[in-house]
Image (cartoon, rainbow, N blue to C red):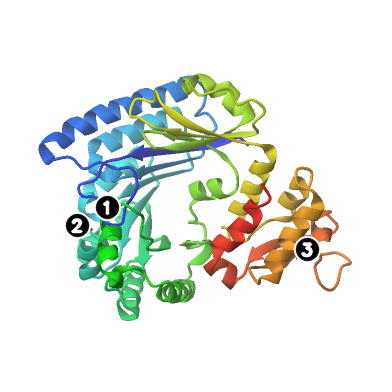
Amino acid sequence: MAVTALYVHVPFCAQKCRYCDFDSRRFAPCDLSAALDAYFEQLYARLDAFGDAGALEGIRTVYVGGGTPSLAGERLVELARRISAWCKPVEFTCEANPESLTAEFAAALAKVGVTRVSLGVQTLDNAELTAIGRIHDANRALAAITMVRDAGLDVSCDLMCGLPGQTAVSWQRTLDGVLAAAPHHVSVYPLTLEEGTPLYRMACRDESLEPDEDFQAACMDTARERLGAAGYHPYEVASYALDGHECAHNIAYWTGRGYLGLGRSAAGMLDAEDFDRLAGLFPDVPARGDAYRVRLVQRDDDATAFDAEYLSQREAAAEDLMLACRMTRGIGPDLLVRLASVIAADELAAACDRALELGLATWVPDYIEGHAGRVISKDVIAGRVRARLAPTHLGWLDGNVLFELFWGLA
């Protein structure tokens, strides 16, 4: 599991959205600049430490998320320049909110190696934007898509369904408006109410604000139909892309690639060999013992405190199976054959059979020579038949049940 991906977290927002429980901070305008300066100096130092240790040599994808990275302005441009000096990623994404993006800023990012901008659009209904605490309007969101495209960058749009006051008609208008703006990639997420957020507290007092799961499922179906008709193929549970514009960074997460986390609350995942090689970058983190994989989360600004989760080889195998279920292609035959040396073939087959029985997945043959009839799970796991276990429509809508089925093998 080579380290091929770098995630950088920028935990600052002009205003925190009512649904958000991510790690982000809001400062008064008079204090924001100094806070950003201090944080980015620590990012630069941490980046150089990674580079000096040789940790960035194999990086193929970079993703700067938040928070609102675009709020950092020229500091984000400088960060991207420094990252590009250490590695040459084939994909480099920065998140942005429409209100803090300009044409000049997008062009500056493009000049220093950024290839892609992910925009937090959420909806094109202004009343819905107000209800969730967003500070841009629909026109600004559409203008931001154009700015990114004009800078020669790929643009991805995040959309949310199940928002307070949202209707089937307003959701259709949002989809139509976004498609008319022609982004390269669209992600669709159902709103979830996280305990402790303002929207959660509001919903405790007013049940009408609580997302309706049936409505959200209908919205997801509508999005899949409309986006598919416009040429966007679903390649992951929440993501649609024009051919050749899939998010390689997210695919690295779902296919078990190693990744590094830079910045407060950023997560990384390393196999045993890479953790041993880079252990000096994570002070006071206990030795891994016989752990097969280590997940690390930075807990402070200056990278002196980390949480560590140690996974056994079996837990790592179960995680790989679970994450593969996020992908439209599902669990490939090579992965099943390989993991049969970690998890007993009978147990693997039983989990696959249960997914089939529940209607959550189906076997899709890759290439079968001299084979006819029904695909048998044990035959795939033994390498006698090549087929992938792909989520069905039900498995896509009710993914948590499918994920738990394979994580239960841990």
For mark 3, what is the residue? 367
Using the numbered discs, state the Cα–Cα distance from disc 1 to disc 2 in whole angstroms. 9 Å
Between marks 1 and 3 in the image, the one whose residue lies nearer the viewer: 1
Q: Residues within 10 Å of mark 2 (few under 14, many from 20)?
A: some
Residue type of the residue flagged with mark 1: Asn
Residue type of the residue flagged with mark 3: Tyr
Helix, strand or loop at disc 2?
loop
The residue positioned 47% from the left and 75% from the top of the image is 221
Place of residue 271 in the rendered image (x, y in percent of width and height, measured from the top left): 61, 33
Using the numbered discs, state the Cα–Cα distance from disc 1 to disc 3 in whole angstroms. 44 Å
Q: Residues within 10 Å of mark 3 (few under 14, many from 20)?
A: few
Name the quadrant containing residue 49. top left
For mark 2, what is the residue? 135
The residue positioned 29% from the left and 69% from the top of the image is 209
First in residue order: circle 1 vs circle 2: 1
- Residue contact at pointers 1 and 2, CB within 8 angstroms: yes
Q: Is residue 21 above or below residue 214?
A: above
Q: Which mark is residue 97?
A: 1
